[in-house]
Every structure is written in C-alpha cells, then in structure tokens.
Image: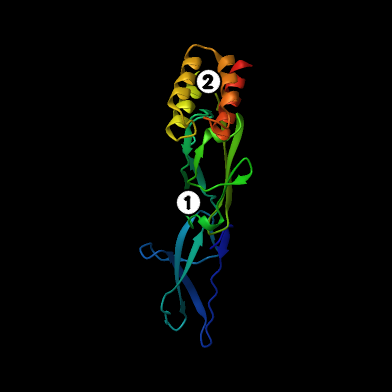
Amino acid sequence: MYTVPLSVRLVATDEFSAVIGTVYRLGGVAEWQPYNGPIGFGNDGIYEVRYRSEDSAGNTETAKSAALRFDRTTPAISANVTSSVYADSGQIDLQITFGDAGSGTDHSRTVVTLDGQPIAKDASLQLHTLPLGQHTIAVTAEDFAVNAAGATFPVRTETSVQSVGALIDLFAANGSIDNGGIANSLRRQLANGSLQALLHHLQAQRGKHVSNVAADVLIRDVGALLQ
C-alpha cells in the first residue's frame, strides 16, 4: 500500500547477450508499450504492471507482473446530526457512516466523543441529560493506509414550553413522576403559563413524587424559561 506518488523503474540484465528492449502494460488488456523510463503513479487505485524484455538473440522472457495499490484519500465521515439545534426533550440515535473506497476504514481506530468524553458510534443520546446549550460530537477515523480524518457535529440543546410538557409526559411514563395527579397538576400549571408556581411545585415534590433526577431537569428547564 502506497500513500505517496512513486515511479516504477524496470531494469533488465542478460548474462549471454544484450538486452534490446523492455515492454510493459498496465492491467491485462492494455497494449504493450516500449519502456523508455520510470512509470509514474499517483492516483488512488490498484494497478498491475506487466513487463517483459527481449535480448539480441531473440529470446523473450515470460511476462512478469507487480501489483501496486495507492490510497491517499482520507475516510469520508457523515452522521445523522441533521440540525444544529435540538429540543432537549428529544433524543439522537446516533448513526455515523464512513466512506473509503481505497483501503477501507479501520473501525478499530475510530473514536467518537461527546464534549470530549468517549461514546459509542451508535449511542442513543437522551438530550435532557445534557446541560442546556452547545455541545460537540467529534469523530476521528483512519483507513488501513493510515490516512486520518476528523469531523465535528455541533449540537445545541434548548428548552421550550413544548419541551417541558414532553418531559413531564416522559417522566410520568417511566415512573420518575409516580403520581398521576401530580403529573396532571404540573401539566395544568404549564398550560396556564404559571411557571413560577410550577417551579415551586417541582421543588416541593423533588424526591417525593418526582424523582431527584427528573425534578432537577424540569427545575432547570422551567428556570431557563423564567429568565
């Protein structure tokens, strides 16, 4: 595997008579061409160089061949991060794809991070677990020719009345809010725009009918709406 341009030089020797010429061709179908000097290669691809020489006694050697493979192109990285702004009530089921038509991507050397912390390339990101604001998914990859590439995907999480409502529904469904009456009361306060009352209600129910984790998320979001 080569990652830099190179030239192939053909040298023929004969112990008994002079070499009168060498011919070569690329692949098995091209015409034989007289060899007049180094053969240059630089584009990505797989090449087969076939060559043979003839001496002054009329002897022609059996054709020999050499295979050359070039890959100077870094992997192409894409992800299903289709927007830079996401509601924090949503999630991203991460899908990262790599394109490398040359040597292929060496997945053992792929690294994916979220805000500098390693994550799986197929991670399911529950966005309410992240602080509100800017985040970065970063991906580095190498192919088997050790061509390296990197890509970053910005993700900004924001809250809204709709996001808070969706989170109340989520926490009621997964048991983080364990009382239906409490959940309905929270929904009514949100729908009525009574954000200060909603905030106090959440603070009072934290660790009781609303788990600490769920309450902290909702308190954070309602506090952001009040700013």
The residue nearer to you, when weighing 204 against 95, is 204
Q: In the depicted view, which residue is nearer to us: 76 or 187? A: 187
- Colour setting: rainbow
Location of residue 123 in the rendering, given as x and y in whole percent from the top left corner:
49, 44
* Nearer to me, 193 or 205: 205
Percent of width and height locating residue 90: 48, 31
The amino acid beneath tag 1 is Asp
In the rendering, at what x and y percent does residue 68 appear?
A: 49, 64
Q: Nearer the viewer, residue 10 or 47?
A: 47
State how far apart marks 2 and 1 are (Cα). Answer: 41 Å
**Image position of 62 with respect to 164: above or below:** below
Image quadrant where residue 57 sits: bottom left
Q: In the image, what residue occupies the spot 44% across and 35% down?
A: 174
Pointer 2 or 1: first along the chain: 1
Indicate whether 44 appears above or below 185. Answer: below
Query: With respect to residue 15, does 5 lie above or below?
Result: above
**Is residue 91 in sight in this rendering?**
yes
Q: Residues within 10 Å of mark 1 (few under 14, many from 20)?
A: some
Residue 114 sits in which quadrant?
Answer: top right
Residue at which label 2 appears: 160
Secondary structure found at label 1: loop
Residue kind at label 2, given as amino acid type? Ser
Residue bearing mark 1: 100
Quarter holding the C terminus? top right
* Residue 59 located left or right of residue 42: left
* Residue occupying the point 47% across, 14% down: 191
**Disc 2 versus disc 1: nearer the observer:** 2
Regarding mark 2 in the picture, which secondary structure is present there?
Answer: loop
